[in-house]
Amino acid sequence: MTAAHPPATGRADVTVLGRGPGPGVQARAAYRALGARLADLDGVRLTEFVTVAALDAHPELAAARSAAFPDAADGARTVVVESLPDPDALLAVRAEPADVGGVFAEGTVRLPTVLPVDDHGEIAHPDDFPAQYAYCLRKAGQLLKNAGLSLDHAVTTFDYTTPATRRAYPKCAEPRRELLGGAGVFPGAGGILMSRLHAPGILVAVDVTASRYPLTTVNPGWRRYDTLTYSPGVRAGRTLFMSGFGALDMETQQAIHAGDVVAQTESVMRAVLEVVAAAGGGPEHLVSLEEYLCPPAAGERAAVAAARARVLGDSSRPAVTSVGCATLLRREFLTEIFPTAVLPAEDSAAAPGGTK
């Protein structure tokens, strides 16, 4: 589930699948394994990939997380997934080093998963998808304000919804246009659909990452983004944060390679490398890929991995986390990939700052 070797940049993400009878046992075992492997690190960022079958065990998962990584527990992302590479695994935990020589982590603020839940534990705006989406963005803005930043510093916004919201999904463009891009740079974005989310009544969950560095849009020249509320890539310091990519013809905006996840993966990875090249990097600068596979493709992970390797070549060994989703916003897509790259050092790189 993770690259066998750390990427050339020195960043070494680690993903551990849960093993054992039940989600609580799996969580404790996964966190013990992570703790043993990451004992020399000063800090980590955590992401839990929790299957729908384990959602009701949230208190046990939270307790295992807090016991193993008390300093990182409150900031963990919690991503609901349909499946994992091991069919017996109910969860997987990924740890990213909080500091790799100041390359990736410096200036980066990653919020815990934002849910449309108020301070009293009540679901905000029941049955109203765009209102819940706006609520999550505003809540994220308040959390960033507490860190001395704002939504203008957002580099990615990844959202997780359900198939029931597909028709309403285009309506999230209005709150995105209102609340994001105020400094002239829209963040990267991605949208994944799961059969259910963290609790009944939650229609959307949003993961927001921001940076203290000045932001620059990275676009290879794809005109489709001229009217959208997200960017293909955002550079902040040396880090290139990218949108989620599906197999799309960037000129016609038509989905391509219907029914063929291998061809879709190759197309996606070529698009990713175009964005990296536009930022001045190459395949060797990719550090991580978060891959979502729809049910028809989830059993073809070996073929998908081979397709990635063919496009990336021998110089690129990013850490890969592969999970299953219910479906994607474009029904033709069988996979969507969220990439991150760390670019070559530049003497002129601006230093991180505070609120704009």
Image: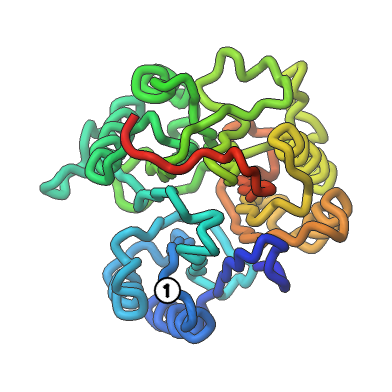
Relative to 106, say whether 94 is above or below: below
Relative to 255, say whether 303 is above or below: below
Res. 21 visible in picture: no
Q: What residue do we see at 32% from left, 43% from top?
A: 202
Q: What residue do we see at 60% from left, 70% from top?
A: 87
Which residue is most to the left? 120
Relative to 1, say whether 318 is above or below: above
**Between 246 and 161, which is closer to the camera in this rendering?**
246
**Between 288 and 251, which is closer to the camera in this rendering?**
288
Q: Determine which residue is flagged by label 1.
A: 42
**Between 206 and 50, which is closer to the camera in this rendering?**
206
Q: Position of residue 39 (x, y in %)?
A: 47, 83
Image quarter of the N terminus: bottom right
Q: Position of residue 299 (x, y in %)?
A: 73, 60
Instruction: Please state if 3 lies on the left or on the right of 149 as rendered.
Output: right
Q: Quadrant of residue 303?
A: bottom right
